[in-house]
Amino acid sequence: MTVLKALMISLILLTFCSKLSATVITEVKVLDGNKAWLVEEHSIPFVTLEIRFKGGATLDRVGKRGSVYFMSALLNEGADDLDASAFAKEMERLAVELDFNVYQDSLSISFKFLTENKSASINLLKKALTKPRFEEEPFERVRDQILSILKSNAKDPRKIASKVFFENVFGSHPYGSMKDGNLESILSLSREDILNAYEDTFNRNQIFISAVGDIKPNELRDLVNEVIEKIPAHSNKVIDQATYKFPEGNTVIDFDTPQSVTIFGHDGIKRTDKDFFSAYVLTHILGGSGFGSRLMTELREKNGLTYGVSAYLASWEKADLILGQFASSNNTVMEAIGIVRKEWAALADRGVTADELQDAKTFLTGAYPLRFDGNSRIARILVGMQTQGLPMDYIHTRNAKVNAVTMEDIRRVSARILKEENLYFVIVGRPTS
Amino acid sequence: MSASYSQSVREQSKHYVKNTFWLMLVSPMYSLRTLGLVLVLFFNSPLEGNASEKVTTFKLDNGLQVVVIEDHRAPVVVNMIWYKVGAADEKMGKSGVAHFLEHLLFKATNKLQSGEFSQIVGKLGGSDNAFTSWDYTAYYQRVSRDYLDLMMELEADRMKNINLTKLDIEVERKVVLEERSQRTDSNPGSLFAEQRRAAMYLNHPYGIPIIGWRHEIEQLNLEDTLAFYSEYYSPSSAIVIVAGDVTPTEVKELAIKHYGALKPNVDFKERRRNIEPPHLAERRIVFEDKRVSQPYVIRTYLAEERNSGDQKKAAIYTVLAELLGGNETTSVLGKALQIDTKKALYTSAFYTGLSHDISNFGLVIVPTEGTTLEQAEVDLDTVIKNFINDGVDEKQLQRIKAQIRASEIYAMDDVFGRARSYGVALTSQLSIEDVKEWPKLLSEVSSEQVLEIARTLEDKKNAVTGWYTKLPKNEDR
């Protein structure tokens, strides 16, 4: 042990997390018993508003894959009295930032506006969300862009690997295809399909809202109500739980490239499982971000087989996986896969060391408060907590849950969830063994 | 706005730049120690300064410059060190050594074991990474404010005390080759960008790739690396930037404690790179690759960078890029080619002002299906010609200036981004005053000035026009 290491350990014991006390969340009641979570921050004259609708790309109707994604791309292409050009000019004049993103399970709206332009900015957002025009002009233009992207994806080894992996694992469930659709589905979509996607997605029963910035609770309530009162509330469409199967062995997709890309995984664990936090800590030790994980140490630091490797829990609404990925030269990728399998089995058999567990806990608990810097970052965390059904005080209890994980928990959970024999690899490239 | 296009192409490149996929093709390509940690931190904002923000700077006796950016909203600090050395300072035949050394600074020092630096940061809940460009090599940690003292101690340690082995060199060289495979060789767009830069610079070392040419990376050795290290890693060629919940007084105290005793490299000379000769011949390159799906045309011109006390021309270039290609729906290129005539799927104009030496201004057109690249290039040139004849839409100019003012406010939210912006500016030979003056210069740009620069785009002698295309059909197997 070096001098610095000793110093460092003494430092760790001194600090823990009283740091989040600065983040005070106010619950603002809005229409229909919905709630917006607000953190006031008046030192910079702007506001970040985050809105999520649960559902996302899984709401695509049968044969209409990509319709929700396509619809979201048209939301800032004209609304109410403004055509695409007038809408864009109004965004520029007010200097707002408005982004839409579609994921398998949700549609997200990120909106930033200046305090000085508050009411005009909200008025513009309201138009986009409640009176989109979906006119022919942007429709065909954006469709051509999506088609171009889909064709490019078909030649991108990473995209190919994802596509094949999820197709083979999830089959006909929406998780088994890419959220942005395919050439046939996008070509077949009509304005009516886009309207259907809009109606299916914009459901006040599925809305989650957070705001951070230069705004008071009462003002936020009024602004949010103004935006959402015209969004209808309807019963939720039922999305099937995904069933999955992991083919045995590896799937190799031939692609002429110097370096193979691989995506791998097997089934995981639910966010609500009592062992979730143990699994989270375990997965961090196995393949967590940055350096020091077992996979990164073995593949990169010791053997120079990759630039980066990671493994993580993908606990979605309708399925739970452990996923991982890396790229390695064609002549080393099979060796690297062998090492991943070996590490997976070793962790399942023997668990982790007490030092590894302690290091993981100090990292995860120390990193958590650091996430709360910046209005936009905080707003995203808050809305994410709401969609996962976490209570407001979660930010104060979360670290205790991490710290409560014991060696015994890790042993039990690693034996339960890590199954080397089930690991399925999709490899895109020209691997040689 | 064509959100779908830029959003979804953005996904492919979220580790590189925030704005658009296409910017990745043209903006400085940072080479990083690892991709995972940076996410949205790297993007080109036209604006980094703010006249009212609390920025303090001072120098230690050994020449080390220290910059403190105060932001007390969260008990977090970003600790950065910027060395005024990058890929454009490498000796001929040793491309990639600056970036290779960046990777190796995470190995052992006299005090630390290999990998221990990141382990320590990780155990404190912090994150760390490093990045290299042509003009700088930078290292940072993001930690709780309580650990600034330790971070500075570690950073000062590795400025002088690395302790590399032959095995470190061998393993890390493989990692860098895998990095090159992943980020360049597996990506035809990156290969094209590399070729275009090489064609752009006739004499200046900006023409070499940051990560290095593969055959030269393969030959990098311990001796080359250590020679580069001892020449450039010194307090007199470094800038420490601390941003977050700190005061200048405490940072000064810590800087003196940890860096104060380090000796400057007395032999170090202010860097001076080869200068570009006049460009007398237009250059055109055609890049064909069977992995290409969507062809496009991109042209870059040599363009004056921001210089200390002399940033007016750069301000005009910045506004010109916004007018021509800042927004897909309202910009000159977007409106004419994407909206009105449907000749293009995507267009953009871009300019990189932060650069030590001469920089680039560029134009891109991604044609719709059925339009040849030849026709696309004609379309692009026609729109520029019309712009020069018709003049600037004053309303558009006003909207752009409103956005520039707003981006000043939005930029305040991102502590890391502000620290990074100062680092890039200061290693490009700008001063804090230059950075603070920049928004004002942008707001003063007039239509006449914009048109004067726009007219120079018709002369292609100092430009490289690149066609990015599929293989001819019969060869595409």
Image: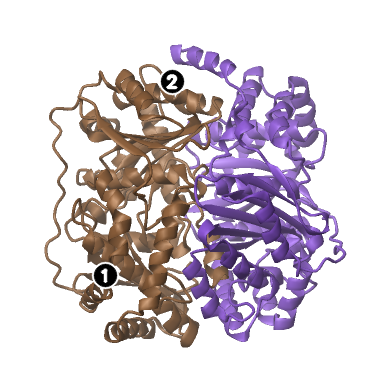
Chain colours: A purple, B brown
Total marks placed: 2
- Could you tell me the amino acid type at mark 2? Gln
Q: Is residue A425 left or right of residue B477?
A: right
- Could you tell me the amino acid type at mark 1? Val
Image quarter of residue A357: top right
Where does the image place residue B206, in percent across and percent down from the top left?
Answer: 25, 54
* Vertical relation: B201 (above or below) A193: above
Q: Chain of mark 2?
A: B
State the SS at label 2. loop
State the SS at label 1. strand
Q: Is residue A168 left or right of residue A213?
A: right
Where does the image place residue B466, in percent across and percent down from the top left?
Answer: 33, 71
Q: Is residue B194 left or right of residue B345?
A: left
* Crowd band around label 2 with a 10 angstrom C-alpha radius: few (<14), some (14–19), many (20+): some
Residue B113, numbered circle: 2
Q: Is residue B201 left or right of residue B75?
A: left
* Vertical relation: B351 (above or below) B56: below
In-front residue for pair B275/A162: B275
Image quarter of residue A53: bottom right
> Does residue A301 appear in this view?
yes
What residue did someone put label 1 on?
A: B464
Q: Mark 1 and mark 2: span between their CA atoms?
A: 47 Å
Which one is earlier in the sequence, the residue at label 1 or at label 2?
2
